[in-house]
Structure formats: C-alpha cells, structure tokens
Amino acid sequence: MAFTMKNIASFSSAVCTSPKWIYDVFLSFRGEDVRKNFVDFLYNALEQKGIYTFKDDEILKQGRSIRPALSQAIEESRIAIVVFSENYASSSWCLDELVKIIECNGVLGQTVLPVFYDVDPSAVRKQKGSFAEHFAKHEDEIEDKERIQGWRNALVKVASFSGWDVPNTANGHEAKCIQEIVEIVMAKLGKVVAIEGENYIGIESRVQKLNVRLNLELDDVRFLGIFGMSGIGKTTIARAVFDRISARFEGAIFLHKVREISKRDGLENLQEKILSGIFCMKDLRISNVFEGSNMMKRRLCYKKVLIVLDDIDHLDQLEALVGQHDWFGAGSRVIITTQDKHLLVKHRVDRMYKVEILNEYESIQLFSWNAFKKNYPAKDYEELSTQIVRYAGCLPLALKVLGSFLYGRDMAEWRSAVERLKRIPEDEIMEKLKISFNGLKEIEKKIFLDIACFFEGKNRDYIKKLLDSFTFYPDIGIKVLIEKALVTIFEGRILMHPLIQEMGWHIVRQEAPGEPGKQSRLWVEEDICHVLATDEVTGSVEGLWLNLSTPKDVVIKNESLEKMKKLRLLKIHNACVSRCPNCIANEMRWLDWHGYPSKFLPDSFQAKKLVSLKLQYSRIIQLWKDIKFLEKLKFIDLSHSKKLIRTPDFTGIPNLERLILEDCSSLVEIHPSAGHLKRLQLLNLRSCTNLRSLPKQIILEKLEVMILSGCSKVDEFPEILGPMNCVIEVYLEATSLKEIPPSIFEYLPSLVILNLSYCKNLTSLPSSICRLKCLETLILSGCSKLEKLPEELGQIESLQELYGNETAISEPPSSLVLLKNLKVLSFRGCKGIASQTRSLSSWMVREKCQDSRGLVIPSISALTSLVCLDLSDCNLLDGGIPCDLGNLSSLEALNLGGNNFTSISAANIKSLSRLKTLLLVGCKRLEILPELPPRTWEMYVDNCTSLQCEADLLLKYENLRMVSFTNCFQLLEDQQIFCMIAATLERLLEISLSEHPSYKHDFSICLPGRNIPAWFTYQNTGPSIKIELPSNWYNDKFMGFAVCVVFDLITEFSLWKTWHVYNHPALGIDFFLRHQGKKSHIFVTELGYIGTDNKIHSDHTCLGFASYNCFDSFFDVPVVSPTYMEVHARCSGGSVLKMSPSAKAWGIHLVYGK
C-alpha cells in the first residue's frame, strides 16, 4: 500500500477522549421571566443561522431536580448561554442546571456565555437583591446545605465570565444585543468546526476545492453541484462546507435527505422548511408547489442566503426548491448533492465537483477511527485492516460500516468476518449502494448488470458493440450510468468501483439465492462448470461468461445449452470440451467460443438475431454447407482455426462488417460472394499460407482495411470493379504478386498505407501509382527484384514515409525532391551498382566494391519535413553522402552506419540544427568523427575499427547523453582517450547538477578497455558490487549514483530502445536498495545503450549516471529514504536472454548537488 502502518502510526498523535457534541448551544433561563420575549427572540435568531440549539420548554417545577435528559443535553452542548433574570435564582432547577454547566466547563471545556437581563451582574455574583431573597427562602426550605453552597459557587463563577449586560449593550436595543450574541456564537463555533475539521479524514482538502468553486468574495448568485457514487461522502463534505461558511449569510439552511422526504411528505413540506428556517416563520403552510415557488422567489430575492439540498434525484426537486438564479439575493450560494451528474447539467449549475474516493492512507485512517478509535490499526491487525480497506475499495461508507462492525471484536472474529465478506457482502452497504440502481430504467438496469457481471474493465467500444447487439442502446445507457456514478471511463475502459460491482453481483444472486442455474447471468467459474455438468440450468439464463485463465476440462451436457432458451451471450475461453452440444439457443446475439470443438455448427443453428460469431482456435472445417440467412450478423472471426478449408456462401449475410480468418493455414479458397459484401469494413486473411483462390472480382463499397500479409501462394490480386472510396490500408507483404493491378490505383483514391514489403516477385511499380493522392506510407522493403521507382513518385505530395530497404534500387528518382511532406526516408541495405557483382568470385567482389559507387542519392535539400533518414549499408564511399544533406532543417535521426567512407564533411553534419541521434555503426574505414550539431543527444560509432578520436572531442558537446564506442579498438592505443571519456562523464554530471534541462534522466558512455576512474569512491572486481552507505549519506542534495562497469558482451541484450531508424541494445543494471528493516526496493535501469548487437569477447567499460528521480518515477510511491543502508548492483540479463552480460569490475560514486 502507499503508506505503511508504521507511517500511519507516526503521523498520529495521542488520541484523547473528546466530548460527543450534539447541540451547538444550550439555553439556561427562568421561563416565566424571559421565555416569551428575550429568550424566544434569541432562540429564533440562533436557529435562523443554523445553530442547533437546545431550549427546554417544559414548565419548571419548584424544588425538583433537573431531569437526566436535561443533564445529558447540557453535556452534549458546545456552548451554554445562561440568561440571568430577576427570578432566575428562585428556581432550584435553574441553579442545578448552572452547577452542571460549570462542571461541563471544567471537565469538557464547554464554553459558557452569561447574559444579564434586567439584573446587575454584581447582584448575581454577590447574591444581592432578589437573588439574596431567593437564597434566603432556599435556606429555609432545603436541608442540603452543600447543594446550596454549590449554587452560590456556580453563580460567582459564571458571573465572572465575559458576557452581556443587556440594558448597557447597544444602548439597550435588545435586537442588536441578540445579533451580537449570535455573531459571537457563530465565531466560536467556526473555530470549533475548523479544529474538528482536522479530524474529518480526507475532508479538508476537498472542502478547499469547493471553496475555490464557491468563491464567496464575489456577489454573484452561484449554484454548485457535488456528485459521486453512493457512500463516497457527498453529504459529509457539503455539511463541512456549510458549517464553515453559513455565518457569512443572512440566512442558511441545510436540507437533509431531500429524495426521501420529498417522496414521503411532498415538495411543499421542503419549501416550508426553507422559508421557516430562513425567516423563522412558524405554522407556515403551503398548499401547492406553485404557490411555494412564488413565495420563495418573492421572499428570498433580496436576501443573501446559503441553501444546501442533500441527495437530489429528480429535476422537479431543483425546480421547486431553488428554481433559478433570480430567486436569490446577491452573494447567495446553493449547494446540491446528487448521484446523478445529468441533473446538474439539466439545471445548469454554475460549477460541479466530482467527489473522488479516499486514498489508501486516508482509508486506513478512517477505518481505524471506527475499528480502533484511533487513526492507525492496533498491533497485529495491520494486515487484516489492509485486506478490509482493499475490499471496501476506499469507499468511506464501507469503511465506517465495517470498522464499526469490527470494533471491539477479537482476532478470530476479524478473520471470520474477512472470509465472510469474500462470499457475502454487508447488507447495510449493499442497500445504500442500490439506491442508484433502483432509480434506473429497466434497460439501464440490464446494461448495468451486464457490465458488472461480464464487461467491467473492458474496452468501451467493445462493450458498446456487445450491448448494441442486444438492442440496449448503449450510447445513452452508458452515459446515464456515468452520470449516476455507477461506472467511470478511464483510458477507454469502463470501470466500476469494486463494491458497486459486488452490488451488481448481489442483485443477480438474489434472483434465485443458492441456485445459479435459475439466475439471469452466470460468470463464476465454479457455478458455470457445475450447472453445465449437472444440467441444473433453466430458461432464465441470458448470459454465460466462462473465461478461464488456463486450459481446463469442462463437461457440457447436451441438454444444458438447449434449456437456455433466452441465452443471448455465450463466452467460453480455454475450456477443453470433448463433446459439443447439438443445440445453441436461437436467441443468441453474441457467440464467442475459443476452441470450439466441432467441425460444423449444429444443423439446427438458426440464430437469426446473431450479431457476432467468434470461434478462434476452433476445429471448424466449414461453418455450414448451405446458405444461411443471418441478416443481423456483422462480425465473423475464425482466426487460428487450422482445419478450416473453405468459407461459407456469404449471400445470406449481407450486413457483414468484419471478416477475420487470420492464420487459417488450411484455408484454400474464399467464396466468390465475399467480393460483394457491400458493408464489409475489414478483411483479414493474414498468414493463410495455403490460400490460392480469392474472389476474381470485388466491389466492397465500405471496405477500409484489407490484409493479405503472408498469403504466400496468392499471386493474383482481384479485379476491382468500381470505386472503393473507403479503403485506407492495404497490406500485401510476403505475397507472390508479380505486378500490382492498375485497378488498385484507379479505384482506391483514399488509400493511405500500401505495404508491398517482401513481395520478392515484384519487379516494378506502375506510373499510375501517382493517382494515390492520399497515400502517406509506402513500404517496399525486401522486394529484392525491384530495381527502380517510377519517376512519377514525386507527384504523391501526401507521402510521409517511404521504405525501400534491401531492394535492388540503385538510384531513386529525381522527383523525390518534390515530396515536401516526407518525414521518413529509408534505403537501408540498397548497395547500388556493387550489388550486381554478387556472382563474381570473392576477390573480384572486394575489388569491385572498392571502385564502384554505392546508392546514388539525388538532391534532397528540398525535403524540409524529413525527420528520419536511413542510408545505412548502402556502400557509400567518400563523396557518396549527398552534398546538400546539411539543408535538412527538420532532421532528427540520421543513420549512415555500415558504409565505406573514411570521413564525413563537417558541413554536412554540423548544419543539421535539430539532429538528436547520429548512427555510424560499422563504418570500419571511418577515421575521424565529424563535428556535431549542438543539439545532438546520442551518438553510436560501434564497430568503427579504424576510428581515431581527438582527445577533447566529446567535451565540446553539452547535450550528449548516450555515447557508444564498442569494438572501436583503435581507441585503446591512445591513452588520452579514456581520460577524455572520464572527463566527459564528470562534465555531464556537473551539467546535471546545474539542473541543465537535458539531464533530468540517466546518461552513459561505453568504450573498449577496463579502466575505472580513480574518483569512483567504491570499487571492486566481480559480477556485482555491494556497498554500505554512511549514516549521513542522504540529504536533499542527493542526485543519484555514478556507475562504472567493466563487462564483456557475450550475447545480445534484452533491453532495447527504439527509434525510427535503429534498435539499440542496452546494458541493464539491477539496483537493490536495502533499508534497516532488511526489505529492499528493486529498480532496473538501463545504462550503456550501444549501437551494435554483435558479440563482443573483449572487455568494455560503461560509465553512466543513474538519477534518483528515475528511481522515484519507477515506483508508485517515492523511494527516496534516509533509511537505506545498503546498495547492491548487478548486471541484468532479462528473462529472454540465453546468457547474461558478464560484469568483471564495478565502481560506484554518490553524486550530490551543489
């Protein structure tokens, strides 16, 4: 989890028992003196401000002790207001109240505020005047002298507190005095709320976000909606906001449970509550909603009010209770809580706030408050608490319910409860969550239950196709579920909170408790296998989803599927079924059976409502022999059905949209009717290696993608009979096509991607290719007989990527310069004229290559959009690199590896202002590196065996991150080179520590040799290194680890970095960071990206820097910690390696910022 129990405990302070406040204010007074005047006005003023006030209205009886309920009310009040009047001391009840108030003041910290109404404070304090007379009477009538002395002490104590002498306050204006009392009470309550808010776990940050949206400094009228799933804390947050800001309004009211009260008592009752609460109107009666709305608008339009409507579920509630903005005076705020976001949209609220679930740290705290009465788990209960928090999905309602249930229970009861929760959900939680479900329409309920049982976490588009096949209208249905906070969308997937999903399961199980065969949906493996094997299914089943993680034998009785007459969804995956049922329900809409065991579908199969037929890895030979009329069928996927020989007649499937027959290696022919499927959008025949016969003619008006890749026996493309304007991608790689029919270029005007790679019989492209005005990607790599490109190629102005790798092309057309939008150009392995000498003897080949020219590149200076250029292995000699290469102003990656030049014109490279990656790998005759542009990040010159390097070359370039010189053995002869490399690393570290923008991540240098610079603090020999960190190793200046590894590369690495023009192996380093508790964090980083995957048997050295920032980003929580005591590093081979790189020596240095 994000926070350990130890962390939580460390954050908590000592927990003290705090009073359980119920009331804000307790009023103590002598009824016959002030009940019907001052106290009544004061009480109404307090209530109008939303201050919950206790006022005892029973007639006090002389000599009686206060009731236990009254004593409890005093204890449960934050503030006590004592109104002293002329006859206050005549009541022993009042005096007993006063003693109790003083007791609560001393023990519970209750605030006491005295009010002296027509009585002098000194008369109360010294018991003079009427107070003396009343006490004289008490002395005569009461024998308990200690009780009387307690009264006297209480009067002295309270009279010494700061309060109000009414005749001498505000010139005797009682109304102003009451207003002042209310303001002081509000101020004191505000401080209490702020203090208590610190114990509202997770509330404070959310309240702050709401305050930003409310913006109380503005005088506009503003509606704020708070929405989210049941139990997430909407009411708690709204109440916290109300408590903090209600004092700033002329009137404020919080209406709880609007949904429930409006159904029970009507909206008129709620209108009465709003007006009565704000205006202190008694016995207000509203006869109908229309009258109430008009009254509210008239009365509230000049008043600054705060209204909170909690738990709204219908628009008519909003229209009746808060209407429009012009109902309220300037500065008013209306807060609405609901589970239905769309209600807020329809009522046009000004701001909305979606309540998020608690994080794991907050969840542990909230659960612990309820389970242990402290904000961290008790000892030995940490793991169980974690399990319960995960079960609750961090939902506040569930955390409170489960915590309260487990409070005071022993370990055995806790374990039993956890196990029970796995099978039986908590009823109180489920009933609360079901409120949103009950408000759905029937079709929306079906969608919700399907998602809960079958589709949670799956792609939204996939789910919509499924639901659409059931005629469930998913676009609006899913939208409603989102608005009611029953589902969410994240990265294109539909997600449910775990408890919401469990609520859906609970609803289905309650259809027939303990009898899954009678329930509408089956999704639990044990239930499904049982009912299929024992034939305990009924016609109630609508959906069955058996998705096994590993293959398993499953018994299906014939009668099982036959009984499920209503079955519309059948998904079976990894079930090994020896015998296939003879019947499949004709109500079926979506049939997905991975490994379908039969050669044919049942003869009785007449699922006229079927939308999708997916039988991957099946034993099907042919779906059916005669024509079947399945007009609703849109999707057929028989991928990897190795025994499929032929397709059915598609005449009866006119609405087919996707036909996928990938890797059906026995498939010989496609029925001619497939060429006339007017709604077909995708035709995928990839790797149908025995396919010979395609429809002779096609007219597929809606087709978007055609895939014939790997159909190695297809040597003729169908004739296109007319325009197919929707086709955007055609893949014909590795077919036996000898020519491309002109109809492709004539009737596919929207084609964007054309892949003809490894069509080894293809000798030429027709000039009509220029008709493809939308073509962006043309792939010709591996067409070994293709010797030239049409001159008209330059007319395809839309072309962005052109790949001609390993073709026989010796000179691209001059019209190449016209391709203004070209971004990627690759002729890797096109060796030009020299390639024609392969039939000569080896000595003649070598001699010819030295004298011949390689690939001849025309002028490319006009290719201003070009980002990647690959001319590697093109037999380029000195002078063979285009002289105008430096004019490519957008070029970022350049690969010139494997060529035969000895030098490169500095002007050609230096002028490439945006160049980031330069590859010169395998240029064995190259002697001198060119001067680099300033933005270059990476340079790979591996296997440049003749390379000599200037000692200060790398020191010139500040931005270099990755440099590799593997197998450049000439460098070993110059001892200054290694010094230069070490100095370069030190310079890179200095730049990084200066927070240079380019060095927020790792960097490295690789070269031959086994020298470790002396400045590496920790050094040793062997396959790994383990160091003990000093006690003061970590501070806020720590940046990361400088690492030096001596290794030999005995096979290719498993970690790769990919660019458009090259793949780069990397040296993996495992860091084990071990702290005091012996627990380790493991971090894998890549140092030493190199430009070759050739085997290397000599020692090489990699110097690099591993930033600690990268360590943090690897984990869900920061790993920066001063508690780490040990670092262990080793080379990482990866799971796919046959052999790991062998490390021979190590150096590590701790790097600190300046």
Image (spheres, rainbow, N blue to C red):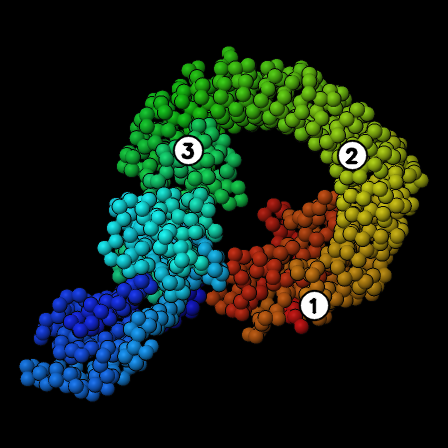
| Quadrant of the snapshot with the C terminus | bottom right
Q: Which residue shows up at 18% across the image and 87% down it?
A: 128
- Would you name the residue on which mark 3 appears? 545
* Residue 1020 in sight here: no
Q: Which residue shows up at 61% across the image and 24% down it?
A: 702
The three-letter code of the residue at mark 1 reads: Ser
- The mark closer to the camera, 3 or 2, is 2
Query: Closest to the observer: 471 or 407?
Result: 471
Query: Which of the 4 quarters of the picture holds residue 191?
Result: bottom left
Q: Taking 195 as reference, is 783 above or below it?
A: above
Mark 2 residue element: loop
Q: Which residue shows up at 37% across the image and 29% down it?
A: 542
- Would you name the residue on which mark 2 appears? 797
Q: Taking 42 as reference, is 393 above or below it?
A: above
The three-letter code of the residue at mark 2 reads: Glu
Mark 3 residue element: strand
Q: Which residue shows up at 62% across the image and 51% down it?
A: 1133
- The mark closer to the camera, 1 or 3, is 1
Q: Give me the disc on residue 232.
A: none
Query: Closest to the observer: 625 or 1014?
Result: 625
Residue 409, position as x, y percentages in the image: 26, 59
Marks 3 and 2, how far apart in space?
50 Å
Marks 1 and 3, how far apart in space?
58 Å
Disc nearer the start of the sequence (1/3): 3
- Would you name the residue on which mark 1 appears? 994
Disc nearer the start of the sequence (3/2): 3
Q: How would you rate the neighbour count of disc 1 (Cα within 10 Å): few for under 14, some for 14-19, many for 20 or more? A: few
782 left or right of 299? right
Residue 656, position as x, y percentages in the image: 55, 22
Q: How would you rate the neighbour count of disc 2 (Cα within 10 Å): few for under 14, some for 14-19, many for 20 or more? A: some
Q: How would you rate the neighbour count of disc 3 (Cα within 10 Å): few for under 14, some for 14-19, many for 20 or more? A: many
